[in-house]
Image (tube, helix red, strand yellow):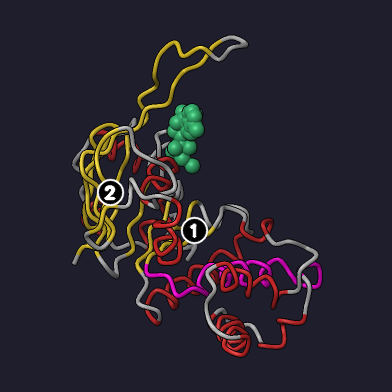
Amino acid sequence: MSILSLQNISKKYPIQRGIFKRTVGYASILRDVSFTVNAGEILAIVGESGCGKSTLARLMMGLEAPSGGQVFYEGKRIDNLSYRRQMPIRRAIQLVFQDPSAALNERFSVGKLLQEPLDIHRIGTKDERMAAVHHALTQVELPPDFSERYPHELSGGQRQRVAIARSIILQPSLLFLDEPLSALDVSLQGQMLALFKKLQQTMELTLVIISHDLGLVEHFSTRTLVLHYGEIAELRDTAELFAAPEHDYTKTLLASIPNQMGKTRF
Ligand code: ADP
Ligand code: MG
């Protein structure tokens, strides 16, 4: 079943010159991109730096408008909504940042950091919000009394877990991970992947993971979308794609994986 669907999406950015920022042309970042994200899957988006992965993710989340084409979330168009009508989408679709723990405000307790999304969306009574904070901490395998702590009192891995708790506290359906592990050392990467997989199963989440780490993608995702200069080169079952890549660009990409990476690391 489809949760998110893109139809003929294109994105252009103006190329501006001079002190008056005169538009001298357009850079075409995405061209005629159409595909569907299935509910419950782990979809990986791969491709070299600058090929348009993050732009595509912002369009999929409704955070940016396409230059052409349409985006549907659960059958409803989300690419042309007003800010107010976007609020339910902003609850259902969440993003885990590249270095999420850097986004934690040091002056707030963990409890306040986790409660903030509930306050913004005006969800629950005071007691219900407190219960949701404790539940989210449990989901990321931290003790509930961590709500009293401050970010500087936490280890790197614990901060990461708090940031993840913040992105799941609104019970989203769709979670975007944009290079989610690149700021972590290798020993923590495996732990976080295991946590994401557990959350995906227990919360019935759909995951979209953007990564240049093909070992991770092969190990973790169910389908892989290969983006090449703003177009889809290939979108297939991950195991099949890694076993027998069809597109020349995918072959080049896979040939660049260091020996046995992904088979030993995770
Ligand atoms: P990736 O995530 O695959 O590295 P991005 O989606 O971040 O790629 O960027 C794709 C291209 O679009 C890059 O050339 C980048 O410079 C350009 N780009 C991204 N965002 C903007 C923007 N807001 N304005 C102009 N150009 C942009
Ligand atoms: Mg990017």
Q: Earlier in the sequence, mark 1 or mark 2?
A: 2
Q: Nearer the viewer, mark 1 or mark 2?
A: 2
Residue at x 27% of width, y 31% of height:
31
The vertical placement of 184 against 9, above or below, is below
Q: What is the x, y in percent for residue 127?
A: 62, 90
Residue at x 66% of width, y 87% of height:
143
Secondary structure at badge 1 equals: strand
Classify residue 171 by image quadrant: bottom left
**Residue to which mark 1 is pinned:** 95
Other residues around mark 2 within 10 Å, as few (<14) / some (14–19) / many (≥20): many
Residue 97 in view, yes or no:
yes
Q: Which residues are magenta?
A: 151-173
Q: Is residue 7 magenta?
A: no
The mark found on residue 208 in the picture is: none
Q: What is the x, y in percent for residue 117?
A: 57, 69
Residue at x 54% of width, y 73% of height:
122
Q: Are marks 1 and 2 in contact (CB under 8 Å)?
A: no
**Residue to which mark 2 is pinned:** 71
Residue at x 45% of width, y 50% of height:
211
Classify residue 248 by image quadrant: top left
Residue type, mark 2 in image? Val
Residue 50 in view, yes or no:
no
1 or 65, nearer to the observer? 65
Other residues around mark 1 within 10 Å, as few (<14) / some (14–19) / many (≥20): many
What is the spatial separation of the Cα atoms under label 1 and label 2, in whole angstroms? Answer: 17 Å
Q: What is the x, y in percent for residue 18?
A: 59, 9
